[in-house]
Amino acid sequence: MEKVGMTYCYSYEEQWQPKDIPVIFRMYQLNFDGSGDFVYQKYWNLYPNHFIEDLTKPSIPPFSPAPA
């Protein structure tokens, strides 16, 4: 997402349907008006489990394909 100019804002947990499992979504946004301080707050306000992740540390190991 950063490669196309989007900025990470926050993460939130939602009960995903139809499997009814908890899923964490990351909210990225791109402001076209040049204002870098506006953050879309709908999901932050809608879901009680929301947080800001430290994305400087990888949470998932990088993918490495199996040797052929």
Image (cartoon, grey):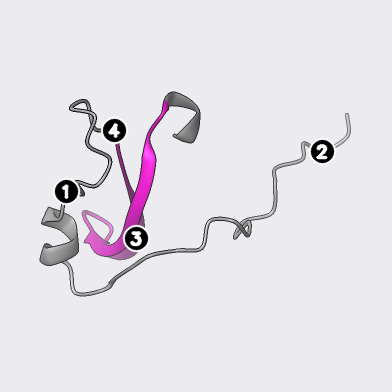
Mark 3 vs mark 1: in front: 1
> Residue 30's mark?
4
Taking the magenta stretch, the answer to whether it contains residue 23 is yes
Residue located beneath label 2 in the image: 66
Q: Rounded to the nearest whole Å, what is the CA distance between mark 4 and mark 2?
A: 35 Å
In this picture, is 1 found above or below 32? below
Residue located beneath label 1 in the image: 40
Given the image, on which type of amino acid does mark 2 rest? Ala
Q: Position of residue 54 (x, y in %)?
A: 51, 63
- Density class for disc 2 (Cα within 10 Å; few <14, some 14-19, many ≥20) is few
Q: Rounded to the nearest whole Å, what is the CA distance between mark 1 and mark 4?
A: 10 Å
40 or 15, which is in the foreground? 40
Mark 4 vs mark 2: in front: 4
Label 3 sits on a secondary structure element that is strand
Taken as a whole, is the magenta stretch helix, strand or loop?
strand
Given the image, on which type of amino acid does mark 3 rest? Val
Mark 3 vs mark 4: in front: 4
Q: Position of residue 14 (x, y in %)?
A: 24, 62
- First reached walking from the N terminus: tag 3 or tag 4: 3
Given the image, on which type of amino acid does mark 4 rest? Leu
The quarter in which the C terminus is drawn is top right
Q: Which residues are magenta?
A: 5-30
- First reached walking from the N terminus: tag 3 or tag 1: 3
Quarter of the rendering containing residue 45: bottom left
Q: Position of residue 9 (x, y in %)?
A: 33, 52
65 or 48, which is in the foreground? 48
In this picture, is 65 found above or below 26? above
Determine whether, in the image, residue 45 is placed left or right of residue 31.
left
Given the image, on which type of amino acid does mark 1 rest? Tyr
- Density class for disc 4 (Cα within 10 Å; few <14, some 14-19, many ≥20) is some
